Image: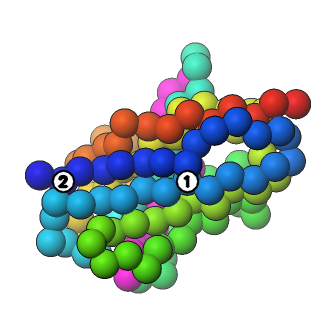
Amino acid sequence: QVRVVESGGGSVQAGGSLRLSCAVSGSPVRNRCMGWFRQIPGKEREGVAAMVTGSGLSSYADFVKGRFTILQANAKATVTVYLQMKSLKPDDSGMYYCATIGYQCPGNWNDASGYAAWGQGTQITVSS
């Protein structure tokens, strides 16, 4: 069974940086679509970034372009990606989730219903 585990959330002041990690285990599929989503209270879950591991292909929501970077980690036991975040704003606060599906991303990478497995989420709080 595919298992998705996020880590790296926390509290930071505006303008600061954080790095989230997402590790996927339990599947032999190494080329996976890995997506980051976030949920802010009172709003729908929204896509932040996604990549297909092993391909170098990545996509970003407009509101994070130039500030967030999704990177693949050099891990052997798991498929792991990072979400490197800089210039954080209070509006970036929320619960961040990692999701995955094998081989390629959904037609719309930010369509949450297209992902098969989700992590439990990690909280980010950005104070002004």
Q: Is residue 11 magenta?
A: no
Q: Say few, some or many: other residues with alpha carbon within 10 Å of mark 1 (under 14 / 14 to 19 / 20 or more).
A: many
Residue at 31% across / 50% down in the picture? Answer: 4
- 108 left or right of 18 in image: left
The answer to whether the residues at label 1 and label 2 have Cβ atoms under 8 Å apart is no
Q: Position of residue 55 (x, y in %)?
A: 41, 82
Alpha-carbon span between mark 1 and mark 2: 19 Å
Q: Position of residue 13 (x, y in %)?
A: 83, 39
Residue range highlighted in magenta:
43-54
Give the residue at mark 1: 20
The residue at 78%/46% (across/down) is: 88
Q: Amino acid at mark 2?
A: Val
Residue at image coords 75%, 53%: 17
Q: Amino acid at mark 1?
A: Leu
Which residue corresponds to mark 2? 2
Q: Is residue 107 visible?
A: no
Q: Quadrant of residue 34?
A: bottom left
Picture mark count: 2
Residue 52 part of the magenta-drawn span: yes
x%, y% of residue 117?
25, 47
Q: Is residue 123 left or right of residue 26?
A: right
Residue in the image at 30% along x and 68% along y: 78
Q: Position of residue 56 (x, y in %)?
A: 48, 81
Left or right: residue 49 versus residue 118 is: right
- Position above or below: 84 against 5: below
Quarter of the image where one finds residue 107: bottom left
